[in-house]
Image (cartoon, helix red, strand yellow):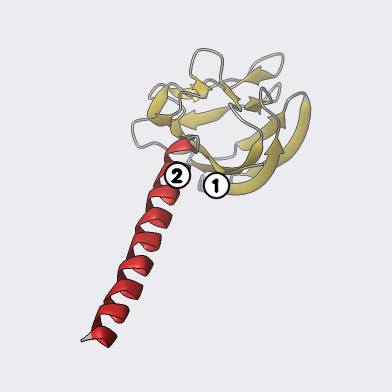
C-alpha cells in the first residue's frame, strides 16, 4: 500500500508539472502577435497602364488578422520585429500582354516578376519570400510604369502574408 501511495504522489507531481507547462505554453501563445492577410486586387478588370509606377491597393480583403495591411494605402506595416512570409499569384488571360509587378520592402525592390502572355493569353506568375522586418517596416506591391494587370471576381491576382515568428 505504501508503494502505491509513493507512486501516486510521483504521478500527481508529474501531472501538476505538466499542467503548469501547458498553462505556460497557453500564456506564451496568447502573447504572440497574430498577423496574417490574404487579399485580392479588384473586381474592376484592367488596372493601368500609367505614366509612373503606382503602389497597388488591394481592395478585396479576405482576411487581415492584426489589421497590419491598409487597403487605403496598399501598405503592409510590420507591427513587430520578425520573420514574415509573403506570396503573390497572378493569372492573366489577356492575349499578347506583358505582366510585371514588383515587391518592395521599405523603398527597396526585393522581388521582380515578369511574364509575356502568348497569343492565347495564358500567364501564371507566382512567387514568395521570407523577409526579416523591423517594427514599422512596410511591404507593398508596385505596378511599374507602362504596364497593366488584370483582376476580376475570379480573384486572379492575390497577395498574402503572415508573421512566421517574432525576433
How many labels were placed on the picture?
Answer: 2
Residue lying farthest to the front in this orientation: 2
Image quadrant holding the C terminus, namely top right
| Res. 85 image quadrant | top right
Q: Which residue is mark 2?
A: 29
Q: Residue at x 53, y 20 (%)?
A: 57
Front one among 132 and 96: 132
Give x and y (percent) for residue 12.
Answer: 30, 68
Nearest to viewer (mark 1 / mark 2):
2
Is residue 99 shown left or right of residue 31?
right
Q: Which residue is mark 1?
A: 123
Q: Residue at x 20, y 86 (%)?
A: 1
Give x and y (percent) for residue 65.
Answer: 42, 31
Q: Secondary structure at mark 2?
A: helix
Residue 152 visible? The answer is yes
Q: Residue at x 70, y 19 (%)?
A: 53
Does residue 2 sit above or below 48 in this rendering? below
Amino acid at each position: 500500500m505504501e508503494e502505491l501511495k509513493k507512486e501516486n504522489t510521483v504521478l500527481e507531481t508529474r501531472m501538476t508539472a505538466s499542467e503548469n507547462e501547458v498553462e505556460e505554453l497557453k500564456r506564451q501563445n496568447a502573447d504572440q502577435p497574430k498577423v496574417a492577410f490574404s487579399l485580392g486586387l479588384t473586381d474592376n478588370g484592367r488596372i493601368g497602364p500609367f505614366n509612373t509606377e503606382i503602389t497597388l491597393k488591394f481592395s478585396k480583403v479576405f482576411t487581415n488578422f492584426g489589421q497590419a495591411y491598409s487597403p487605403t494605402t496598399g501598405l503592409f506595416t510590420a507591427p513587430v520585429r520578425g520573420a514574415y512570409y509573403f506570396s503573390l499569384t497572378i493569372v492573366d488571360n489577356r492575349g499578347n500582354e506583358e505582366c510585371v509587378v514588383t515587391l518592395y520592402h521599405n523603398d527597396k525592390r526585393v522581388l521582380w516578376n515578369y511574364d509575356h502572355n502568348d497569343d492565347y493569353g495564358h500567364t501564371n506568375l507566382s512567387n514568395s519570400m521570407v523577409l526579416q522586418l523591423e517594427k514599422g517596416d512596410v511591404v507593398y506591391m508596385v505596378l511599374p510604369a507602362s504596364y497593366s494587370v488584370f483582376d476580376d471576381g475570379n480573384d486572379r491576382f492575390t497577395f498574402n502574408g503572415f508573421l512566421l515568428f517574432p525576433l
